[in-house]
Image: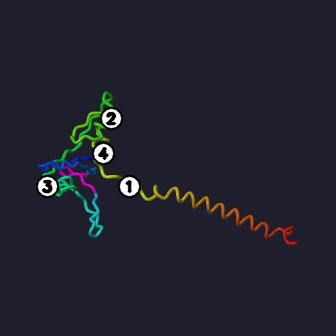
């Protein structure tokens, strides 16, 4: 995984900062890519960092975007803190080794659908067991000769 941090260079000061993680591809001259879902038709497209940079600032829509590829070096001596997570540079020398660098500017990640519904599935399973026990109790009473007086 390779992270790039982008910064708007608009004169007058938009200053928007954002970032994306890209998957490394095999091949000597293959740039990293990320999947992007096109809003018009939902098609998934491979996007390279250069395309994100040429696309301009998502806040003001103007070009002139600076990009930095994050290069991390692990260091026991420097703890990872807000200075790392909010950095707009491409160099990281701390305990995270670049994993958290610029993370404050990354898009919010949605939990996978299974994580969102895991609690509800457990609730339904418990409810099903309770209904099964109640049905079993009713069936036992219906078959009990002492109850048929």
Q: Secondary structure at mark 2?
A: loop
Sequence-wise, which precedes: disc 4 or disc 2?
Answer: 2
Q: Which residue is mark 2?
A: 80
| Residue at the front extreme of this rendering | 12
Magenta-drawn stretch contains 138: no
Q: Residues within 10 Å of mark 3 (few under 14, many from 20)?
A: some
The quarter of the picture where residue 133 lies is bottom right
Q: Does 147 sit above or below residue 88? A: below
Element assignment for label 4 = helix
Q: Looking at the image, which is closer to me, 134 or 72?
A: 134
Q: Residues within 10 Å of mark 1 (few under 14, many from 20)?
A: few
The answer for how far apart the CA atoms under marks 2 and 1 are is 24 Å
Q: Position of residue 128 (x, y in %)?
A: 62, 63
- Viewer-nearest of labels 3 and 1? 3
Q: Which residues are magenta?
A: 25-34
Give the residue pinned by disc 4: 104
Question: Circles 2 and 3: CB distance less than 8 Å?
Answer: no
In magenta stretch: residue 31: yes
Q: Nearer the viewer, mark 2 or mark 3?
A: 3
- Per the model, the C-alpha gap separating discs 3 and 4 is 22 Å
Left/right placement of residue 134 relative to residue 108 reads right
Q: In the image, what residue occupies the spot 24% across and 42% down? A: 70
Disc 3 target residue: 63
What type of secondary structure mainly makes up the magenta span? loop
Residue in view at x 23 percent, y 57 percent: 47
Residue occupying image coordinates x 22% and y 55%: 59
The circle on residue 110 is 1
| Of the pair 101 and 87, the residue shown nearer to us | 87
Q: Earlier in the sequence, mark 3 or mark 1?
A: 3
Where residue 20 appears, x then y in whole percent?
27, 51
Local packing at callout 4 (Cα closer than 10 Å; few below 14, some 14-19, many 20+) is some
């Amino acid at each position: 995984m390779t992270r790039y941090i982008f910064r708007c260079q608009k004169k007058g000061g938009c200053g928007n900062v954002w970032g994306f993680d890209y998957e490394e591809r095999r091949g000597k001259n293959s740039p990293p890519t990320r999947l992007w879902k096109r809003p018009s038709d939902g098609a998934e497209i491979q996007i390279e960092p250069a395309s994100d940079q040429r696309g301009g600032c998502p806040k003001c829509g103007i070009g002139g975007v600076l990009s930095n590829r994050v290069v991390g070096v692990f260091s026991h001596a420097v703890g990872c803190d807000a200075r790392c997570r909010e950095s707009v540079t491409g160099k990281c020398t701390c305990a995270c080794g670049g994993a958290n660098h610029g993370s404050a500017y990354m898009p919010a990640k949605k939990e996978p659908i299974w994580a969102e519904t895991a609690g509800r599935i457990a609730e339904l399973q418990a409810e099903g067991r309770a209904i099964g026990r109640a049905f079993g109790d009713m069936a036992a009473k219906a078959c009990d000769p002492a109850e048929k007086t």
